[in-house]
């Protein structure tokens, strides 16, 4: 076999003799049977994984924001309920004829104010607990739908608890 002249390639030498040299095939058609389309399947799988990870990160951020909002709602609701209790307690005579009715009035005032403030500040539910006629505790909850609501069954609940003491408001 002859060596090519300097500055020429084997292709040009082969072409000079009248028979072109085979070039490497750039098509995938000569590969193992059944390997066609692998990149399409792999790309689809990677895309699904990336979308899942983005939705997971978004859901985690959403849950963190819901927890902060629920804590704020519980604190504000407990303070509001304590203020309502304080308003009810101010100027009360120590000789109350119907103590049960008075306590129920306190509970209603504190509970109504606390639930109203909690729901206005983003809590889905607010449970009001009275540890004594002067102390109110609020448990606020917010439900967070994960995965941007695409999967309705996946829901987490952010819960926060806050308490406050009622102080008498001076009557003037």
Image: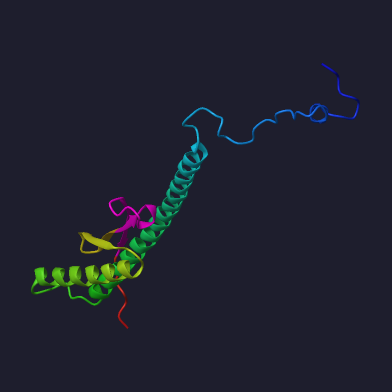
Q: Nearer the viewer, residue 171 or 22?
A: 22
Magenta stretch, main secondary structure, is strand
Residue at the spot 25% in from the left edge and 70% down from the top edge = 85
Q: Nearer the viewer, residue 46 or 154?
A: 46
Q: Position of residue 129 (x, y in %)?
A: 22, 59
**Residue beneath the point at 35% across and 55% down:** 150
Residue 119 x %, y %: 30, 68
Specify whether residue 7 is painted magenta.
no
Residue furthest bottom in the image: 172
Instruction: Say left or right for 14 vs 76.
Output: right
Vertical side of 14 occupied by 157: above or below: below
Residue 134: quarter of image = bottom left
Residue 125: x and y, percent? Answer: 26, 62
Quadrant where the C terminus is found in the figure: bottom left
Tally of numbered tags: 0
Residue 157 on the magenta segment: yes
State which quadrant residue 103 falls in.
bottom left
Residue drawn at x 51%, y 27% as measured from the top left: 32
Q: Is residue 16 above or below residue 43?
A: above
Above or below 23: residue 140: below
- Residue at image x 78%, y 29%? 18
Q: Position of residue 21 (x, y in %)?
A: 74, 28
Left or right of 29 in this view: 76: left
Q: Quadrant of the N terminus?
A: top right
Whether residue 167 is visible, yes or no, is no
In the image, residue 136 sits, relative to residue 47, either above or below, namely below
Q: Is residue 9 left or right of residue 101?
A: right
Residue that extends furthest to the front in the rendered view of this protein:
18
Taking the image as shown, residue 26 lies to the left or right of residue 137, namely right
Any part of residue 66 in sight: yes
Q: Please give the range of residues in magenta.
A: 141-165
């Amino acid at each position: 076999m002859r060596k090519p002249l300097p500055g020429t390639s084997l292709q040009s030498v082969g072409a000079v003799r009248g028979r072109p040299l085979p070039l490497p095939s750039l098509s995938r058609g000569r590969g193992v049977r059944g390997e066609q389309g692998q990149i399409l399947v792999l790309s689809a799988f990677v895309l699904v994984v990336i979308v899942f990870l983005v939705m997971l990160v978004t859901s985690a951020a959403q849950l963190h924001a819901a927890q902060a909002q629920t804590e704020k709602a519980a604190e504000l609701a407990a303070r509001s309920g304590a203020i309502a209790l304080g308003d009810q307690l101010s100027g009360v005579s120590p000789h109350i004829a119907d103590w049960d009715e008075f306590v129920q009035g306190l509970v209603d005032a504190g509970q109504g104010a606390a639930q109203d403030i909690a729901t206005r500040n983003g809590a889905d539910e607010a449970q009001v607990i009275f540890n004594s006629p002067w102390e109110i505790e609020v448990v606020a909850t917010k439900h967070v739908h994960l995965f941007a609501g695409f999967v309705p069954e996946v829901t987490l609940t952010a819960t926060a608890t806050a308490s406050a003491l009622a102080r008498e408001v001076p009557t003037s």
